[in-house]
Image (spheres, rainbow, N blue to C red):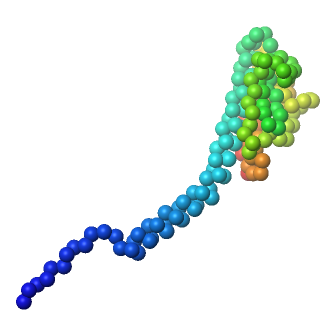
Amino acid sequence: MKKIKAKKQFGFTLVEILLAVMTLAMMATVAIIIYPSFQKRVELDLYSSEIIQYLKRARTKALTGEENSNYGVNFEIEKFTLFKGNDYIPENSENEEVILPEILAISDINLTGTGTSVIFEKGTGNALNTGTVNIGIKIGDKRIITVNSIGNVEWEWEE
């Protein structure tokens, strides 16, 4: 009597392949659903940080007395601008303007006095206009940026 040796089989069964494909499909579906929201939050954090950096740059320029002038940052719905002087003049070629992507907007500009600018005093760096400015996803999260009287800038999340 001859013994028949079973050959070892290598590879995957159909069930294993189907499970792997279904797992990958579920992971791809979750990624497709979550990615746009994640991307919007990254943009929001990036531009929130940029606003804070512009406010700090304006304060530093005023504090050091650069060009013997005050400096400020003006806020509008779709952009913010670093400027020199006591007043924001849109046509000034020295302005440094940042336009926000379409998904973001600046809203709820609540500053003391009139206007939409935070101005820092030369020599002291104190803020002449204090308060809050919100930047947010048009439908969703926002960040609240606060400037106090001594020119310190802080931000907090609001979802």
Q: Nearer the viewer, residue 109 or 19?
A: 19
- Identity of the residue furthest to the top in this view: 68
Q: Residue at x 78, y 47 (%)?
A: 138
Q: Residue 126 appears in which quarter of the rendering?
A: top right
Residue 59 x, y percent position in the rendering: 74, 22
Q: Residue at x 74, y 37 (%)?
A: 100
Q: Nearer the viewer, residue 150 or 4?
A: 4
- Identity of the residue furthest to the left in this view: 1
Residue 139 x, y percent position in the rendering: 77, 51
Q: Residue at x 49, y 68 (%)?
A: 22
Residue 37 relative to residue 148: left or right = left
Residue 73 x, y percent position in the rendering: 79, 26
Q: Residue 43 appears in which quarter of the rendering?
A: top right
Q: Is residue 109 in view from this perspective?
A: yes
- Identity of the residue furthest to the right in this view: 114
Q: Residue at x 69, y 32 (%)?
A: 50
Q: Is residue 142 in view from this perspective?
A: no
For the N terminus, the quadrant is bottom left
Residue 21 relative to residue 56: left or right = left
Q: Is residue 122 above or below residue 33?
A: above
Residue 97 relative to residue 30: left or right = right
Q: Nearer the viewer, residue 116 or 29?
A: 29
Residue 136 x, y percent position in the rendering: 76, 44
Instruction: Give the mark count.
Output: 0
